[in-house]
Image (tube, rainbow, N blue to C red):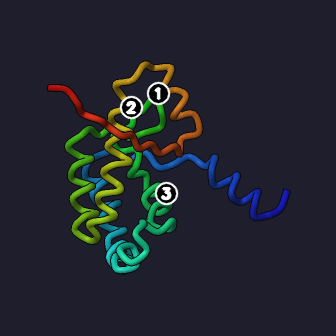
Protein backbone atom coordinates (compact mmCIF):
# COMPACT_ATOMS: atom_id res chain seq x y z
CA UNK A 1 0.00 0.00 0.00
CA UNK A 2 1.43 3.38 -0.96
CA UNK A 3 1.88 6.15 1.60
CA UNK A 4 -0.80 8.31 0.00
CA UNK A 5 -3.26 5.39 -0.01
CA UNK A 6 -2.44 4.67 3.63
CA UNK A 7 -2.87 8.36 4.52
CA UNK A 8 -6.26 8.48 2.78
CA UNK A 9 -7.39 5.29 4.50
CA UNK A 10 -6.26 6.59 7.89
CA UNK A 11 -8.00 9.94 7.32
CA UNK A 12 -11.18 8.15 6.24
CA UNK A 13 -11.31 6.09 9.45
CA UNK A 14 -10.26 8.84 11.87
CA UNK A 15 -13.10 9.80 14.19
CA UNK A 16 -14.61 13.20 13.56
CA UNK A 17 -15.08 15.68 16.40
CA UNK A 18 -18.34 15.58 18.28
CA UNK A 19 -19.34 19.15 19.03
CA UNK A 20 -20.68 19.33 22.59
CA UNK A 21 -22.91 22.37 22.15
CA UNK A 22 -24.44 24.90 19.77
CA UNK A 23 -21.81 27.40 20.93
CA UNK A 24 -18.97 24.99 20.10
CA UNK A 25 -20.48 24.39 16.65
CA UNK A 26 -20.77 28.13 16.01
CA UNK A 27 -17.17 28.66 17.14
CA UNK A 28 -16.05 25.86 14.80
CA UNK A 29 -17.85 27.34 11.80
CA UNK A 30 -16.65 30.85 12.56
CA UNK A 31 -13.05 29.64 12.61
CA UNK A 32 -13.53 28.46 9.00
CA UNK A 33 -15.11 31.65 7.66
CA UNK A 34 -11.89 33.43 6.59
CA UNK A 35 -10.89 30.44 4.42
CA UNK A 36 -14.40 30.02 3.04
CA UNK A 37 -14.58 33.74 2.24
CA UNK A 38 -11.16 33.66 0.55
CA UNK A 39 -12.35 30.82 -1.71
CA UNK A 40 -15.76 32.31 -2.52
CA UNK A 41 -14.85 33.69 -5.95
CA UNK A 42 -13.11 30.42 -6.85
CA UNK A 43 -16.18 28.50 -5.68
CA UNK A 44 -18.39 30.58 -7.94
CA UNK A 45 -15.99 30.45 -10.89
CA UNK A 46 -15.56 26.67 -10.64
CA UNK A 47 -19.27 26.20 -9.95
CA UNK A 48 -18.43 23.84 -7.09
CA UNK A 49 -17.27 24.03 -3.50
CA UNK A 50 -13.54 23.18 -3.35
CA UNK A 51 -12.70 19.79 -1.87
CA UNK A 52 -10.53 21.44 0.78
CA UNK A 53 -13.55 23.40 2.01
CA UNK A 54 -15.66 20.25 2.23
CA UNK A 55 -12.80 18.52 4.06
CA UNK A 56 -12.41 21.41 6.52
CA UNK A 57 -16.13 21.38 7.27
CA UNK A 58 -15.99 17.59 7.72
CA UNK A 59 -12.90 17.70 9.96
CA UNK A 60 -14.51 20.39 12.12
CA UNK A 61 -17.39 17.99 12.82
CA UNK A 62 -19.97 20.32 11.30
CA UNK A 63 -21.59 17.79 8.97
CA UNK A 64 -22.49 15.80 12.10
CA UNK A 65 -24.38 18.60 13.80
CA UNK A 66 -27.76 16.94 13.20
CA UNK A 67 -26.50 13.36 13.21
CA UNK A 68 -27.53 11.29 16.24
CA UNK A 69 -24.86 10.68 18.87
CA UNK A 70 -25.27 6.93 18.41
CA UNK A 71 -23.88 7.42 14.89
CA UNK A 72 -20.97 9.64 15.95
CA UNK A 73 -22.74 12.97 15.50
CA UNK A 74 -23.29 15.91 17.77
CA UNK A 75 -27.11 15.69 17.75
CA UNK A 76 -27.52 19.44 18.20
CA UNK A 77 -30.76 19.67 16.24
CA UNK A 78 -32.24 21.51 13.32
CA UNK A 79 -31.94 25.05 14.69
CA UNK A 80 -28.16 24.63 15.14
CA UNK A 81 -28.00 23.30 11.58
CA UNK A 82 -29.78 26.43 10.31
CA UNK A 83 -27.46 28.73 12.29
CA UNK A 84 -24.34 27.02 10.96
CA UNK A 85 -25.68 27.16 7.40
CA UNK A 86 -26.38 30.87 7.81
CA UNK A 87 -22.86 31.51 9.11
CA UNK A 88 -21.28 29.67 6.17
CA UNK A 89 -23.53 31.49 3.71
CA UNK A 90 -22.42 34.83 5.16
CA UNK A 91 -18.93 34.05 3.84
CA UNK A 92 -19.96 32.24 0.64
CA UNK A 93 -23.54 31.70 -0.43
CA UNK A 94 -22.66 28.67 -2.53
CA UNK A 95 -20.81 26.98 0.33
CA UNK A 96 -23.71 27.70 2.67
CA UNK A 97 -26.14 26.22 0.14
CA UNK A 98 -24.11 23.04 -0.38
CA UNK A 99 -23.60 22.57 3.36
CA UNK A 100 -27.31 23.13 3.98
CA UNK A 101 -28.23 20.51 1.39
CA UNK A 102 -25.73 17.92 2.61
CA UNK A 103 -26.22 18.44 6.34
CA UNK A 104 -29.96 19.01 5.94
CA UNK A 105 -30.45 15.80 4.04
CA UNK A 106 -28.38 14.06 6.67
CA UNK A 107 -30.96 15.35 9.17
CA UNK A 108 -33.76 13.87 7.03
CA UNK A 109 -31.97 10.52 7.26
CA UNK A 110 -32.93 10.54 10.96
CA UNK A 111 -36.49 9.72 9.87
CA UNK A 112 -35.46 6.59 7.99
CA UNK A 113 -35.46 3.11 9.57
CA UNK A 114 -32.56 2.41 11.94
CA UNK A 115 -31.15 -0.16 9.51
CA UNK A 116 -30.85 2.51 6.81
CA UNK A 117 -29.28 4.98 9.23
CA UNK A 118 -26.77 2.32 10.31
CA UNK A 119 -25.81 1.58 6.71
CA UNK A 120 -25.33 5.22 5.71
CA UNK A 121 -23.42 6.15 8.87
CA UNK A 122 -21.25 3.03 8.79
CA UNK A 123 -18.01 4.83 7.92
CA UNK A 124 -18.81 8.06 9.79
CA UNK A 125 -18.03 10.30 6.80
CA UNK A 126 -20.92 9.70 4.45
CA UNK A 127 -22.62 12.69 2.93
CA UNK A 128 -26.00 12.40 1.30
CA UNK A 129 -28.05 14.55 -0.99
CA UNK A 130 -31.51 13.63 -2.09
CA UNK A 131 -33.92 14.86 -4.68
CA UNK A 132 -37.52 15.57 -3.84
CA UNK A 133 -40.09 15.52 -6.56
CA UNK A 134 -43.24 17.10 -5.34
CA UNK A 135 -46.27 16.29 -7.35
CA UNK A 136 -49.94 15.98 -7.03
CA UNK A 137 -52.96 18.06 -7.64
Image coords of residue 86 (percent x, y): 21, 58
Q: Is residue 121 above or below residue 32?
A: above
Q: Quadrant of the C terminus?
A: top left
Q: Which mark is residue 55?
A: none
User: Could you say which quadrant of the image residue 39 lies in?
Assistant: bottom left
User: Could you say which quadrant of the image residue 135 lies in?
Assistant: top left
> Callout 2: helix, strand or loop?
helix
Q: Mark 2 to mark 1: distance in Å? A: 6 Å
* Residue sticking out furthest to the front: 137
Q: Mark 3 to mark 1: distance in Å? A: 21 Å
Residue linked to disc 2: 109
Q: Quadrant of the N terminus?
A: bottom right
Q: Mark 3 to mark 2: distance in Å? A: 21 Å
Label 3 or label 2, whichever lies nearer to me, is 2
Residue drawn at point x = 22 percent, y = 68 percent = 90
Residue drawn at point x = 28 percent, y = 63 percent = 88
Image coords of residue 136 (percent x, y): 19, 26
Q: Residues within 10 Å of mark 3 (few under 14, many from 20)?
A: some
Residue linked to disc 1: 117
Instruction: Depth check: give the residue in front, 44 or 57.
Output: 44
Q: Are marks 2 and 1 in contact (CB under 8 Å)?
A: yes
Amino acid sequence: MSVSTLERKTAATKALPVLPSREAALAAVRSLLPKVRARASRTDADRMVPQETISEIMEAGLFGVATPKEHGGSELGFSALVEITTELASACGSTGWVFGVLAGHSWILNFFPKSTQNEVHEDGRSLSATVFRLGGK
